[in-house]
Each structure stands twice: as C-alpha cells, then as structure tokens.
Amino acid sequence: MSKTKRHAPQHNRRSRAKSAPKLTLLGGLTAAEFLADYWQKRPLLIRGAIPNFRTLLSPDELAGLATEDGVSARLGLEKGGKKPWQVEHGPFTAKRLTALPKAHWSLLVSNLEHWLEEAGALLDQFNFVPLWRADDLMVSLAPPGGSVGAHVDSYDVFLLQGYGRRTWQISTGGDQTMRPDIDLRILKKFVPEQSWELEPGDMLYLPPGVAHHGVAVTDSMTYSIGFRAPSQRDLLADFFALPEALTALVATDAMYRDPDLKQQTNAGEISTSAVDRVVSMLAAPLANRDLMGRWFGMHVTRSANAGTAPAVRRRMPSSDAVNRALADDREVWRSDHVRFAHFTAGDGRLYLYVDGIEHELDPRLGPVVEAICNKRCHQGSELKKLLPRGKASEGPVTLIRHMLQQGWLYLGK
C-alpha cells in the first residue's frame, strides 16, 4: 500500500516532439520529456515501469553468484556484526550466507551485467542516457526489515523493484551529515517527506542529492541502475596527465614571454600578470575540441573494475566464419567486461575507445562502430545490413573479427 505525505511527483504532459514514442518505462513520458522535466531535477515514481516484470535471477541464484571469484559482492549487517552497519566483502562461502540472521542484513552484487545477458538487455532499455554515463546494474537482496540505511548518492539512479516489496522514503532537503565511525555512509538524521511501497515492475528515479531510505517489506530484490558523473577533481587530475600523443596536438616549444614586464617592488613575488600569462598558455588545450573529445573518450571508458575478469582472447575467426554467422542471424553480443565509446573529430577521423585505449579507425567503419557502441546485442542480420557490398565489406568484417578475437564481442544464439 502506498503511503504518501504529499502528492507523488506527477509528470508534465505538455507536448514535445509528437513523433517520439511514449515509454512505459518512463510512465508514458517520451525520453525527451523525462530528460527535460526530471533528469537531475526531481524524483519520479513510475508504477508498472516494466509490466509483468520477472526478477532476472532468484535469491538463491544471487547468493550463489556472490560466492564466485571475480564477482563484486558486499554484505551489509545493520545488526549481528562486531559493530552496527558492518560491511563484509565477497566472495562469500555458502556457509557464511546460510548462517545469516533472519533480519537486518542486505546482500549487494554489483555489475550484474558482467555475468547475466538479461541484465545487459535491461540496461539497454535506459539508452536514452548516453552509455558513457552508465555505471552498472546492482542488485540488493534483503529479508523483511533489511536495509542499507538512509543515504544520499552523488549519481542518478533508477530503483526497479524486481522481487517482493520494498518501501522507499525520500527527502529532498534537510541535514546531510553522515554518521561517524561506521562502514556505510548513512545519514545521521533523516526526516522523510514522501513514502511509497514498490512492487515488482515499479520504479523510482532519484537525481543526485536526494536522500532515500529503502526497507524490505517482504523478502525483496531491488535492481539499481546507476549513472556515474566524473568529478571536477578527477577530470583535472586525469587531464593534466595527458599522454604525449595528445599533448602534441596543442603543445609547442613556445616559451613563456613577458615583453610588457614591469619592475616589481618585491622581486620574489609571483605577480598576478605572470599567472595570467601562464593561464593563457595553458588555455589552448581546453579550447581544442578534438583534443578534449579524444581525452574524454579515454577517461570515461577506463573501467574502475578493470581486472575483475580475465582477459579473453580467442582464435581469430575467418572472414567466412563471420559472414556465415551474420547470414545465419546469430546474435552478436558486446562484452560488458569492457566499456565502449566512439568519437568523430572535426577533421572526420574516427576513434573507438575500449577500456580507456584509443583506436583510430577508417571513417568508413563508422556505421558498424556506431551500432556496436549503441547497444549490447545485435541480430546478425542487423549488422549485415550495415556492411557495404563487395570488397568494401572487408574492413568492417575484419573489425568484427578483431573484436571477437579480443573478447570485446561474442556470438550468441
């Protein structure tokens, strides 16, 4: 039953692009309407976002996944640990998980898309947000009363109820001081403004900075679709460690010049005019869009989870084998163990980014690169339509062969 202290957020029905489809996932809004009215602005409750939604895996299957090497799993114990809100990190033994108390814990598994194709397909439903913004699909399992406490996230998140029922309370203001000396970032004080009970298929969108507290009503599984945003601190630190190949685009041997130098009262002082000259010298890289685009492509595809799964290199498939797979309409999946993005520079050069590494490609490969970066799974027939006829198809097929060999792509059914 929904308990509301104020009216639930209602979406603005004003007309925007008439041809844009209205999405059940967004409560009947178009993607443009959602982005304009809600994204990073205000919460949105969506009943039946995915009608008849069935959980991607059972509680027992999730617990089994948390025992596997390479899986990012955490256990939050509100009670029953050596201290309140204790966090343990996986992989866990089956014995540890079966010994959990009846209440007051949550099991969280991150990057579910790494291990379950259905999780990647679910993430693709959120492609109205650029893929470089996507972080991961995390799932949390909790018994009745289970929670990770009231907290605030610095990123956008969609909370999709997948199994059982969970109550969510939110607050858009108030004191955001954290409790000291505990493993989790939990608010010291939390005064809820609104409250809803979510059932399977219901979803709550929260922009950054909205305090929220979810408590399982029954055995419950919630899927969190998170979208990361780089901080100014991280951007600056990474940008000023530019690889030499990119620095060469804008850097010259031009020396610091001060023909308008005036005598200073104190010769040991760095004057404001000297600082202005240095700022002017360093401003050139920031004004070069190609440089910024290429650096940003490397930055945002560099995975924080690199190394959690072994690199998969396969035997290079033949061109005939790839063409047969596409002709037979085999599924072509993009691996979720690596991040992808592409960028086209002002001079038309095409760059593909895979896990922070830049690959300059023939611009004629653009249609295939764009398709592969746009979603996780393609039918072979979809990709085949993008291939030029005759000898011109050799380049795109060679690219697909290489990506299959590297383990960036793999063939499904």
Image: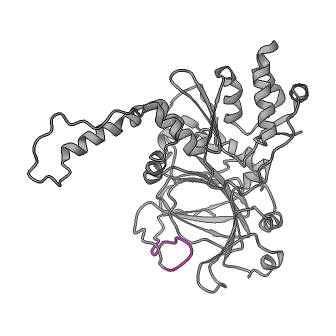
| Above or below for 304 versus 61 | above
Q: Quadrant of residue 28?
A: top right
Q: Is residue 388 visible?
A: yes
- Look at 59% across and 78% down and name the residue there: 85
Residues rendered magenta in the picture: 181-190
- Look at 14% across and 52% down and name the residue there: 267
Q: How is the image coloured?
A: one colour
Quick one: 115 or 176, which is closer to the camera?
115
Q: What secondary structure is the stretch in magenta mostly built from?
A: loop
Relative side of 124 to 258, left or right = right
Relative side of 290 to 29, left or right = left
Instruction: Give the quarter of the figure containing the C terminus.
Output: top right
| Above or below for 213 versus 179 | above
- Is residue 95 found inside the magenta-colored segment of the image? no
Instruction: Give the quarter of the figure containing the N terminus.
Output: bottom right
- Look at 57% across and 37% down and name the residue there: 31
Quick one: 177 or 2, which is closer to the camera?
177
Where does residue 365 sit, x and y in percent of width and height? Answer: 69, 23
Where does residue 52 sit, x and y in percent of width and height? Answer: 76, 50
Relative side of 63 to 82, left or right = right
Where does residue 274 sit, x and y in percent of width and height? Answer: 22, 44
Q: Quadrant of residue 221?
A: bottom right
Quick one: 254 or 355, which is closer to the camera?
254
| Above or below for 34 versus 391 | below
Where does residue 295 sit, x and y in percent of width and height? Answer: 52, 39
Quick one: 132 or 193, which is closer to the camera?
132
Q: Is residue 27 visible?
A: no
